[in-house]
Amino acid sequence: MAHAHKLEIFRGLLKFKSNTQKIWGVLIFLSVITAVEVVLGIAKPRALTHSHFVGMKLINWVFIILTLVKAYYIAWDFMHLRDEKSSLRRAIVWTPIFLVAYLLFILLFEADYIYNVYKDGFIQWNF
Amino acid sequence: MDSTVTTGTAEENVWGGGNSPLGASYGKMMMWFFIVSDALTFSGFLAAYGFSRFKFIEIWPIADEVFTHVPFFHGNYPMIYVAFMTFILIMSSVTMVLAVDAGHKMKKNSVIWYMFFTIIGGAIFVGSQAWEWGTFIKGDYGAVETKGGRILQFVNAETGERAAIRDFAKTIPGDRVAHENSKGVWFYDEAYLPTYSFNEVVEGFKANPSILIRTEQIVQEGEKEGEKTLLNREESLKKIKDGRLVVEGANLIRNEYGSRLFADFFFFITGFHGFHVFSGVVINVIIFFNVILGTYEKRGHYEMVEKVGLYWHFVDLVWVFVFTFFYLV
């Protein structure tokens, strides 16, 4: 093999012996995260559903962060971005992150404004 | 990657072509750029979903109450089946990476087997999605739509469970004559005909004192925060007067779960994702046969398996986000 795989995940905390082992390791990690998400989604602990952070329920923040963690490991290990040159990786990763963050910022603020117009304005829609 | 085809001599001729500064072949890079643009498309859809949801944040349907079915089992199992689908897709992603890995080692038979399992996983996923759509379209309890286009659902006060309209609607004998071409100046399609007429539901509702109405409004504060508003009997009797027609299941115009946009986005986004999974399975099958025929063995590298793998993982990646924003959040 001309090019070696990088076999460490969690910033070197966990090092696998072979690429195949790393794949199974990442699968276990992703499954655990999915299981945590599903359990939280069914149980809906009050501590998380009744407290808010920046206008969103804490449980939703947990879900979104876990999703981004999953996305990171899918892209880095399954799509082997970890083994690509950093220039290619940056071109692929930062372009959508920038554009999506921008789009979300604009759309969600606009939607919140419309929500307030519906709520406080003289429009009857919920009848 | 050792499978990358590098042409030309890189040390000389900086501007003469033949360099690959990103260390990826043309095909692989184009696959990546396609994935980036496709990711932006999906992000646009999900952002639009977020837009509509934030706009109607107080009345949006609660996913746990919509997707509660598991095939071959009766009862209320929110999220279990979607979790299973997610697991299937992640699993088929794993067999795909294993196929790529075996390709690097030029193990033809392993590649064949792993590709085969990947295709099976994809097929199970697409089938599950079709079932999910079917259940969603068929609906469960039925509801009443008001003049303002909002949905009223019914709850049994004794059990606290949702009440299906078929359980309390009265049967009022009557004939309904189908409108035909010969009787009209112009032929219009027959309007959608629910199992029970609006009148039958209203009469049944009035006759059953234990049936209450649940509105779309989500309680914003207090003990019941995050749950739909449950009216008491008097309020319910008043509210039913706003009703106009019976809604069963879901289509692009109205659905019994709540906001109309919810079903529209569900069909559009999971449909677009399902289409990606389907085309991914088709491409996987093509590559699978190429591997069997020994095309890549002759070519000396399995880069095609790697490229189709990238696409397959991307489909998995998108599902991770769809799962979060449709079923969890």
Image: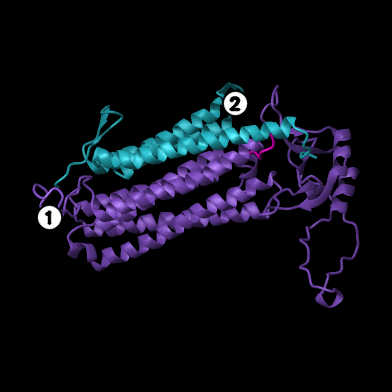
Chain colours: A cyan, B purple
Figure check: B294 above or below B326: below
In the rendered image, the residue lying farthest to the front is: B15
Image point (41%, 37%), residue name: A97
* Label 2 Cα neighbours within 10 Å, binned few <14 / some 14-19 / many ≥20: some
Left or right position of A15 against B150: left
Is residue B298 something one can see in this rendering?
A: yes
Left or right position of B32 against A55: left
The local secondary structure at tag 2 comes to: helix
Type of amino acid under label 1:
Gly
> Residue B292 location in percent, x, y?
27, 65
Q: Main secondary structure of the magenta part?
A: loop
Residue B52: in magenta span: no
Q: Are marks 1 and 2 in contact (CB under 8 Å)?
A: no
Q: Are marks 1 and 2 on the same chain?
A: no
Rendered-image quadrant of the C terminus of chain A = top right
Left or right position of B17 against A113: left
Type of amino acid under label 2:
Thr
Q: Which residue is mark 1?
A: B8
Q: Chain of mark 2?
A: A
Residue B58: in magenta span: yes
Q: Which residue is mark 2?
A: A49
What is the spatial separation of the Cα atoms under label 1 and label 2, in whole angstroms? 59 Å
Image point (59%, 52%), residue name: B267
Q: What span is in magenta?
A: B57-62
> Residue B41 location in percent, x, y?
47, 48
